Amino acid sequence: MRRLVLTAVLTAATLAGCTTPEQQKAAAQPPASTTGTPTAAPASPTAGAAPSSPAPTAAPPWVVGATPLPLRPDGFGQVLPTPPVLADRALPTRDLLPPPAGGEYASTVSPVPADVLARSTWSAACPVGRDELRYLTMSFWGFDGRAHTGEMIVNASAAAGVARVFGELHAARFPIEEMRVTAPAELDLAPTGDGNNTGAFVCRRGTGLSSWSAHAYGLAIDVNPFCNPYVKGDLVLPELASSYVDRAWERPGMVLAGDTAVRAFAAIGWSWGGEWSSPLDIQHFSALHR
């Protein structure tokens, strides 16, 4: 979970809270309009008039992955207070895939395309073969109130069930900030403690363990990890998500006992890490029970 949670580790471009490492440089560029409203063409300068200065562009509310954290002796980032802009997190989503037509839920299940597999963490050394995995695209509602299309790699045995779960989350308008395939570079990026990617397959060991994580089989999903942190002793992952350890302060994107997310995953036989005692892994749902 550690490095998956550190998908925190991605930079956001424009006003979005999420991008891939290859898009980090673009995060500093001014955002394009996403409203769909045409912008009026600039008026022709009047003869003899001084040229006008361009209108200033609003700064992004937060650039995810921009600031590496100082490290603890255990290699994780230092757990720091949640920045005010993230305490009630509502960053907009950058579309990586075309959004669903009309805001209706849509999903697809297919073998993992070669180009997707190439940008994922899968290799021949992973505990599951490429033919045992499936590529999903699924609609979700962002914190920006807009419908988006996400992507996910999961175990073939769980693909249909996972698509149903996210259909229920979509119907409940449960907000998700980001849903994309984890890239290999993310496993080794310095921790920034601010990521919020909802994802499944990551070929890695369990946090603090020598055995494979359930994520390495495509049989675990972390939902809004910043809003639903992993907690063990004084460690909080993502490291800036300490505000969300307080589960009595209910905010959008949180997974709570008995809610739609917990019921939907339970219906396909998956357990919830929010019911564990130590660690408390609130973001984590898995087909492999402890």
Image (cartoon, rainbow, N blue to C red):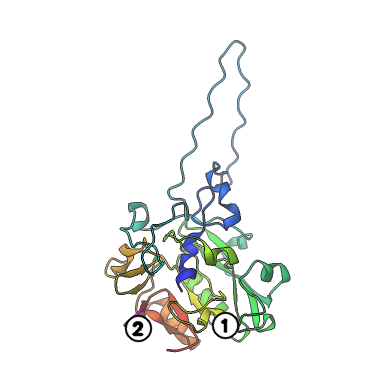
Q: Main structural element of the magenta stretch: helix, strand or loop? A: loop
Residue at image position (57%, 76%) is: 203
Q: Mark 1 highlights which residue?
A: 217
Instruction: Kindly state the secondary structure of the residue where label 2 is placed.
Output: loop
Q: Quadrant of residue 183?
A: bottom right
Residue at image position (35%, 68%) is: 236
Task: Answer above or below: position of 269 versus 65.
Answer: below
Label count reads 2
The answer to whether any part of residue 258 appears in the image is: no
Residue 133 x, y percent position in the rendering: 64, 80
Of the pair 109 and 22, the residue shown nearer to us: 22
Q: Quadrant of residue 238?
A: bottom left
Residue at image position (61%, 18%) is: 45
Question: How far apart are the two marked residues, 2 and 1, measured between alpha carbons?
Answer: 21 Å
Q: What segment carries the magenta color? A: 275-279
Q: Quadrant of residue 159?
A: bottom right
Residue 266 x, y percent position in the rendering: 45, 85
Residue 245 x, y percent position in the rendering: 31, 68
Task: Answer above or below: position of 88 versus 129.
Answer: above
Does residue 276 belong to the magenta stretch?
yes
Q: Between disc 2 and disc 1, whose residue precedes?
A: 1
Numbered tag placed on residue 228 in the rendering: none
Are dots 2 and 1 in contact, CB under 8 Å?
Answer: no
Q: Mark 2 highlights which residue?
A: 276
Which amino acid, mark 2?
Trp
Residue 195 x, y percent position in the rendering: 46, 61
Instruction: Kindly state the secondary structure of the residue where label 1 is placed.
Output: helix
Which amino acid, mark 1?
Tyr
Residue at image position (50%, 49%) is: 15
Which quadrant of the rendered structure holds the C terminus? bottom left
Q: Is residue 27 left or right of residue 122?
A: left
